[in-house]
Image (tube, helix red, strand yellow):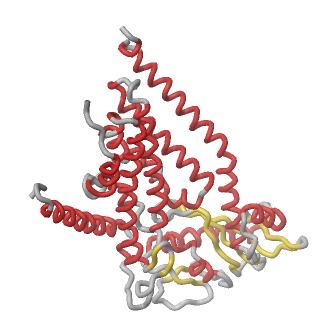
Amino acid sequence: MSMREKNWFPILYMFITTLLLSAVVIAFGTITRQRVKDNERIAFERAVLEALPIDLSGRTSPSEIHITYRENITEPTKSTAGALGYRKNDSLIAYALPIDGPGFWAPIRGVIGIAADKQTITGISFYDQNETPGLGGEIVKSEFRDQFVGKRLADEGTSLEIRMVSVELDESSVHAITGATQTSTRLNKFLDKRLSAWRDAMKEIE
Amino acid sequence: MRSQPKMQNIVLDGLWGNNPIFRQILGICSALAVTNLVLNTMVMGIAVIFTTALSSLTVSALRRWTPRVIRMMIETLIIAFYVILFDQALKAYWPDMSRNLGPYVGLIITNCIIMGRAEAFANANPPGLSFIDGFFSGAGYACVLLVVSIVRELLGMGSILGIPMPFFSSALWDRWIIMVMPPGAFFTLAVICWIFRSVQAAKETQVPGGKK
């Protein structure tokens, strides 16, 4: 009776195959782990910079993003209520507030930039979203994001409103993406919640 | 001894005669999910070609030693192995695309095309031919998906690969948003299967001795 006909042969065969293939997968995973982590970090840093009044033209490679981030951005402190700071010559120019909440398909994560007056929006960006490509996914496009620049947070009611395209805008509102009602509604909700919470916290600090 | 299948037939079968999507109706799940933008579809197609080709090659290379009772477990293991490698590579070197495709790369493991080719072909044929068979079955899948995605992106967004197309991106064309939503995939795939199968049927009636 050859080895191949023994009862234990399939078990041994399965064991050895699994061992070999897993070893390769684990090795490859270990090699790329740091890279995957760095990618996530850079995506966040890029989002922070894009939300702030920083000219990134021509400096968009991962290493340039990282250097610009390190030179300009300070980690959140007690006095910023969870927001990152953008400083130049020791004076604070703007806050970058990380925002996240439920989207239509999966959580949306992003950053909103607010000027030192705590009222003017300097920009918004998203680094993690899985909305429908072509619809909700358009929130990452500049056509949508550029609307936020220069808007002012309202003192009463919704601090920043995303309105239907047919409704007129004021200084505290932007237009939604046609066809992406769910994404817009949900984004509006958690954006408002985060912004009001932050402003309340900032008032308390003062 | 059984005669070996001819190279030319393998290629044509994978791409047309026995196309996994519109002849065998396999791998429909991902065909519906990733076809709303042409770029996503291209990467998904490459992932499937990579996996079917290499897993068929490996299954075939091991076929003389693999005990029959556990062959399907071994096949699944091999398929999962290649898919995970591709997924990891995408995460590390093309993070944006990895985010776009979400869980669908991982789900290639359960794509019936790959297991189907391993069972139907690689188990009984030499590694070289199995590789070709896997490659062109994957390519057949990718081609149909590309057609679906071109139709969907063009009608739904007025663009192809993100580039605005004349007429479809102008005010004359009212974008069919539903085409990039899930229902659009069902409409498009059904129509494409219908057209391709009709062409095939017309061909077969022309050939003397072919099926009537």
From where the camera sits, is residue A159 visible?
A: no
Quick check: A31 above or below B65? below
Does B2 sit left or right of B131 as displayed?
left
Total numbered labels: 0
Q: Quadrant of residue B143?
A: bottom left
- Tell me residue A183's x, y (percent): 48, 70
Seen as rendered, the residue at the extreme right is A89
The structure residue drawn at horizontal position 54% and vertical position 63%, both measured from the top left corner, is A129
> Quarter-wise, where is residue B117 in the image?
top left
At 44% from the left and 71% from the top, the residue drawn is: A182
Q: Which residue is drawn at the image coordinates 58% and 49% (left, top)?
A: B89
* Residue B163 percent coordinates (x, y): 50, 78
Q: Tell which of B91 and B198 is nearer to you.
A: B198
Residue at far left of view: B212
**Residue A42 visible to an observer of this rendering:** yes
Q: Position of residue A45 (x, y in %)?
A: 71, 63
Nearest to the observer: residue A82 or residue A25: A25
Is B177 placed left or right of A190 in the picture?
A: left
In the depicted structure, whether residue B174 falls above or below residue A132: below
Q: Nearer the viewer, residue A199 or A115?
A: A115
Foreground of the two, A70 or B144 = B144
Which part of the image, by quadrant, shows the C terminus of chain A? bottom right
- Extreme-top residue of the structure: A1
Image spot of residue A1 (x, y percent): 36, 8
Is A13 placed above or below B93 here? Answer: above
Q: Residue at x 57, y 47 (%)?
A: B88
